[in-house]
Amino acid sequence: MNTTHTYCQTHATRRLSSQRGFTLLEMVIVLGIIGLIIGGAIGVMGKVGDGAAIQRVKGDFNSLGSVLKMYKINNGFYPSTSQGLNALVTRPSGSPAPKSWTALADRVPLDPWGLEYVYRFPGSKVATEFELITRGKDGQLGTSDDISSQE
């Protein structure tokens, strides 16, 4: 009886030891699948992030446009290109001198990539209106990812 008990114990130990844990191949396969899932998620999130940045630019164009129109109502004209968007925050010097200047903003917002918006008056397409431009993700003016308020 002692022999049977030892045989059963040895057989059970072998069975348990062969079923314990994962093999190295199984771990590599699981980690590979997890890597593919994470890589795909990051790719999708990057595209969503670009879309959100473009929507923010459009929102900033609308907000700045409203403030610039208020500046024009108060003073009879838009700030010049050299006066720029800072004319909304601090009284601009130079010509044209504002008649009835008041601070219309606490600060000039930055684009989603942390750069200042480019302001032009007159605009490049509609000379009677201002133009706001973001340099886009690459930070370079005049490239394909630029966005203009006159487009």
Image (cartoon, rainbow, N blue to C red):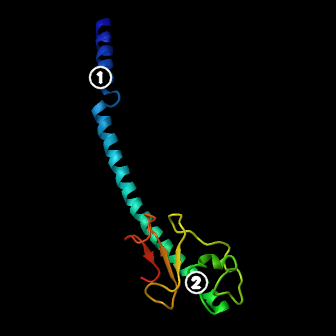
Viewer-closest of 32 and 76: 76
Vertical relation: 147 (above or below) 12: below
Residue in view at x 44 percent, y 64 percent: 137
Quote the CA–CA distance across marks 2 and 1.
Answer: 84 Å
Q: Amino acid at mark 1?
A: Arg
Residue in view at x 33 percent, y 18 percent: 13
Q: Quadrant of residue 24?
A: top left
On residue 116, the disc is none
Q: Are marks 2 and 1 in contact (CB under 8 Å)?
A: no
Query: What residue is shown with label 1?
Result: 15
Mark 1: few, some, or many residues within 10 Å (few <14, many ≥20)? Answer: few
Q: Amino acid at mark 2?
A: Ser
> On the rendered image, what quadrant is the C terminus found in?
bottom left
Residue in view at x 31 percent, y 27 percent: 19
Query: What residue is shown with label 2?
Result: 80
Mark 2: few, some, or many residues within 10 Å (few <14, many ≥20)? Answer: some
Measured from the top left, where is residue 125 in percent x and y?
43, 86
Circle count? 2
Measured from the top left, where is residue 133 in percent x and y?
48, 76
Viewer-closest of 13 and 21: 21
Report the residue that reaches farthest toward the top: 2
* Side of 100 relative to 20 (left or right): right
* Side of 101 relative to 85 (left or right): right
**Mark closer to the chain start, 2 or 1:** 1
Vertical relation: 7 (above or below) 70: above
For discs 2 and 1, the disc positioned in front in the rendered view: 2
Measured from the top left, where is residue 145 in percent x and y?
39, 70
